[in-house]
Amino acid sequence: MRQMETVKKIKIVIAKEFSKTPGPRHIKEGEHSGEMFRQDILLPRLKEAISGNVKLWIDFDGTAGYGTSFLEEAFGGLIRKEGYTYDTLSKILEFKSDEEEYLKEDIDIYMKEAQDEKKK
């Protein structure tokens, strides 16, 4: 069992822990959906990072690529469906994407848009 005081960040390597072929937005639409990733992997690790006051580092490399709907559901869904704020997420989440550098910016946009939707 790892000790929290020695852990500087919690990590998710999507290609190893979830799928090399991320799928659609919703579970009902097919395998390896953004909704499933959020519920089964992202949300539990986010809660662990917040309670441990550490960063959540997510590695996007090593997959066949990501659809907009997958990313929007996973990360925008943290705000729309799980009740987190953009400010909280932007302080906790760190992204690694050497293969598709633009993913970091896209995810930031999806989270900001979800935050704006909540304000309406």
Image: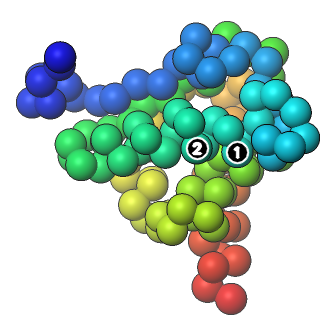
Asked if residue 77 is positioned above or below residue 41 in the image, the reply reads below
Question: The C terminus appears in which quarter of the rendering?
Answer: bottom right
Q: In the shown orientation, is residue 67 left or right of residue 19?
A: right
Residue 98 in view, yes or no: no
Q: Quarter of the image containing the N terminus?
A: top left
Q: Which mark is residue 113?
A: none
- Residue 100's spot in the image, x, y percent? 72, 24
Tell me the tag on residue 35: 1
- From this view, report whether residue 2 is shown above or below residue 23: above
Q: Amino acid at mark 2?
A: Gln
State which quadrant residue 40 falls in: top right
Q: Position of residue 82 (x, y in %)?
A: 54, 62
Q: For the point 64% across and 57% down, which residue is it?
A: 77
Displayed quadrant of residue 38 = top right
| x 63%, y 79%: residue | 118
Q: Secondary structure at mark 2?
A: helix
Q: Of residues 113 and 1, which is closer to you in this image?
A: 1
**Dot 1 surroundings within 10 Å: few (below 14), some, or many (20 or more)?**
many
Q: Amino acid at mark 1?
A: Glu
SS class, disc 1: helix
Is 34 positioned to the left or the right of 47 in the image? right
Which residue is nearer to you in this view: 105 or 88?
88
Q: Position of residue 76 (x, y in %)?
A: 65, 57
Residue 39 is labelled as 2
- What distance separates the C-alpha of mark 2 from that of mark 1? 6 Å
In the image, farthest residue toward the right:
29
Q: Residues within 10 Å of mark 2 (few under 14, many from 20)?
A: some
Pick the front one: 117 or 27: 27
Q: Are marks 2 and 1 in contact (CB under 8 Å)?
A: yes
Residue in the picture at 25% in, 40% down: 54
